[in-house]
Every structure is written in structure tokens, then in C-alpha cells.
Amino acid sequence: MFEEHIAYLKDNPKGYWFKAKLYGWGWVPVKWQGWAVIAVYIAAVSCFAFTIDESSPVREVVFTFLLPITLLTFTLIRICYAKGEKPRWQWGPPKKDDK
């Protein structure tokens, strides 16, 4: 099973940064560029998370955390669509004729 998953991820003739997940819907980073995008996203979310504390007013939380996180997530999804395989629902490796 694990070897099958690795073979699916390595089969990337079009050079996608993100491939469709093997189980479910969404993407998995498969090239270093995809992993770099994910790392930058996590770092940016972490930086914004450190800007709030329990005494922060709601308005400040919305404008210094929720709005930037929403924009970052939207940007991540756009990058995945642009540089990745078309997402689709999968439940296991695709058949040879499905590609």
C-alpha cells in the first residue's frame, strides 16, 4: 500500500507542485516548490497567531488574525489550483485508463 502511494506521487510527468490526494479530495505537495508554499503558509499563519492574546478585543482579532488568515488560505488554494493537478474525489490509486 505504501509503495503504491509513493509510486502515485512520483508519477508526475507534467511537473505538478501538488497532486490530487490518493484518498479524499484535495492536494498533496509533491515537489519542493509545493512544500515551500506550505511552509510559507504555516509560517505566516503562525506569525499572525502570535499577534493575538486573550485580552485582545474582538475587532482587533478580526482585523489582525481572521482577515489575514482568510486571505492567506484563499491564496494557498489559488496556488494549488494553478500549480496542481485538478482535484477530484479518489478512493485509492487511479486506474490506468482514468489518467
Image (cartoon, rainbow, N blue to C red):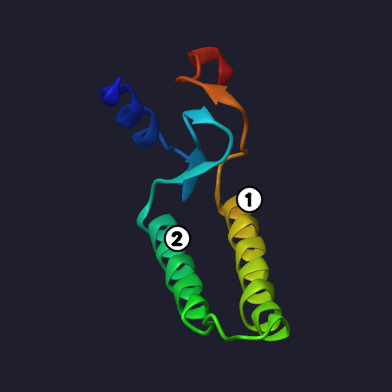
Determine whether 9 is above or below 41 in the image: above
Of residues 93 and 97, the one nearer the viewer is: 93
Q: Residues within 10 Å of mark 2 (few under 14, many from 20)?
A: some
The x and y percentages for residue 45 are 50, 71
- How far across and how far down the image is residue 91, in percent? 52, 20
Q: Tell me the quarter of the image containing the C terminus.
A: top right
Q: Is residue 94 above or below residue 35?
A: above
Q: Look at mark 2 in the image and give the residue it sits on.
A: 38
Task: Point out residue 44 in the picture as x, y percentages from the top left corner.
Answer: 48, 75
Left or right of 70 on screen, residue 99: left
Badge 2 amino acid: Ile
Is 71 left or right of 10, judged from the image as shown? right
Q: Amino acid at mark 1?
A: Tyr
* x then y, percent, for residue 81: 63, 50
- The answer to which quarter of the image holds residue 98 is top right
In the rendered view, does 63 fall on the left or right side of 21?
right
Of the numbered discs 1 and 2, the one sitting upstream in the chain is: 2
Can residue 94 be seen at all in this image of the molecule?
Answer: yes
Label 1 vs label 2: CA separation?
A: 14 Å
Residue in the image at 67% along x and 62% along y: 74
Q: Residue at x 46, y 63 (%)?
A: 37
Residue underneath mark 1: 81
Is label 1 in a helix, a strand or a loop?
helix
Q: Quadrant of the N terminus?
A: top left
